[in-house]
Amino acid sequence: MKGERGGFRMLKREQLLQELVHDSYKSKRKLAGPSRCPECGAVYQRGRWSWASAPAGAHEQKCPACHRIADKFPAGYVSLKGPFLREHREQILNLVRNHETKEKAEHPLERIMAIEDTAQGVLVTTTDTHLARDIAEALYHAWKGDLEFHYNKEENLLRATWSR
């Protein structure tokens, strides 16, 4: 493992990323009662957000993912680069979107914020570090290539780069 650069620590692909610091977008305490996000419809009950019907009398509370999206403040960045990306762009982006759909069905706070073209390739931003890691690993498992992770625990921010 290499040293830290600019607050980021380079990680090997095999290392687990655990939340080392508190995410300021997540509640510091459990919400008092059931809540429903007015933006996406996710429901908070029994200590977690899920896709469920809101019970009668549920409070309106914006979920952490919708807060991040509104603030344009991603927790994860996945950079996609290389000639293989240019040749297989549609397939690669389908894998990225399908992976998000699968994860979001179980975990409403794990979402893609944006997929943007850059000078080097494509940048995918996410509301959660775990989704960014999972997308990068899914790309690696599907097509191999090179994969790097840089995690900044002070900012709870993950930057992943996949290239082939």
Image (spheres, rainbow, N blue to C red):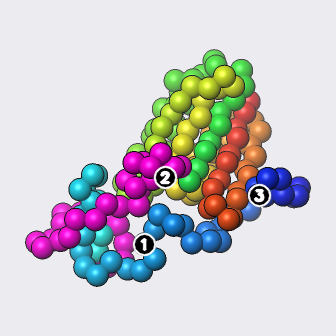
Tag 1: amino acid = Ser
Residue furthest left in the image: 56
x and y percent of residue 127 in the render? Answer: 49, 52
- Asked which secondary structure carries label 3, the reply is loop
Question: Which callout, 2 or 3, points at the residue further toward the start of the chain?
Answer: 3
Give the residue at mark 2. 127
Task: Provide residue 110's location: percent of width, then percent of height.
Answer: 45, 55
The segment highlighted magenta reads 46-74
Distance of mark 3 from mark 1, alpha carbons? 24 Å
Q: Quadrant of the N terminus?
A: bottom right
Q: Of the residues under marks 3 and 1, which one precedes in the sequence?
A: 3
The first of marks 2 and 1 along the sequence is 1
The reply to whether the C-beta atoms of the residues labelled 2 and 1 are less than 8 Å apart is no
Residue bearing mark 1: 27
Q: Report the residue marked by disc 3.
A: 7
Q: Is residue 7 left or right of residue 96?
A: right
Q: CA distance from mark 2 to mark 3?
A: 20 Å
Element assignment for label 2: loop
Q: Amino acid at mark 3?
A: Gly
